Image (cartoon, rainbow, N blue to C red):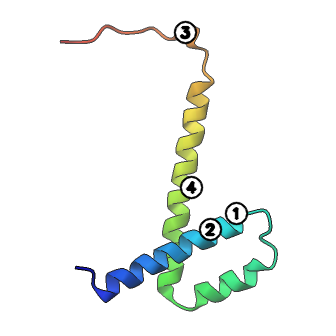
Amino acid sequence: MHTRRSLESASISAQAAEWLVRLAGEEPRGLHAQYVSWLRQSPLHVAEALRVGGLFAALRRTRLERLELDELDSSNIIELPLRR
């Protein structure tokens, strides 16, 4: 059963994620003042924006690391036998 607090928290998470997407878009101009206004509404907004931003950064690093691995020259990779 969802409590009012958990639903509110989910809504704030969704709003923070939406702001991240909007600000990363092609037309972030004019959004800055609106974003700052949203952040000022509650310390929960600030905390969630930081959390979502951190998740985004971690995902981006992971994606970049994977891309770097994909670009490695496979000629220097030795396949090891499976242990049983």
Residue receiving disc 1: 24
The extreme front residue here reads 1
- Amino acid type, mark 4: Ala
Name the residue: 75% across, 78% down. Answer: 31
Residue receiving disc 3: 76
Q: Position of residue 9 (x, y in %)?
A: 40, 80
Residue receiving disc 2: 20
Disc number lying in front (1 or 3):
1
Q: Position of residue 42 (x, y in %)?
A: 51, 90
Disc number lying in front (2 or 3):
2
Q: CA distance from mark 4 to mark 1?
A: 12 Å
Q: CA distance from mark 4 to mark 3?
A: 30 Å
Q: CA distance from mark 4 to mark 2?
A: 11 Å
| Residue 35 occupies quadrant | bottom right
Name the residue: 63% across, 24% down. Answer: 71
Q: Is residue 19 left or right of residue 84?
A: right
Q: Are marks 4 and 3 in contact (CB under 8 Å)?
A: no
The extreme left residue here reads 84
Name the residue: 47% across, 74% down. Answer: 13
Q: Are marks 2 and 1 in contact (CB under 8 Å)?
A: yes
Position above or below: 64 against 25: above
Q: CA distance from mark 1 to mark 3?
A: 38 Å
Q: Position of residue 67 (x, y in %)?
A: 60, 33
- Amino acid type, mark 3: Asn
- Amino acid type, mark 1: Ala
* The C terminus - image quarter: top left
Residue receiving disc 4: 57
Q: For label 1, count other residues whose C-alpha is less than 10 Å away and answer few (under 14), some (14-19) or many (20+).
A: few
Disc number lying in front (4 or 2):
2
Q: For label 4, count other residues whose C-alpha is less than 10 Å away and answer few (under 14), some (14-19) or many (20+).
A: few
Q: For label 2, count other residues whose C-alpha is less than 10 Å away and answer few (under 14), some (14-19) or many (20+).
A: some
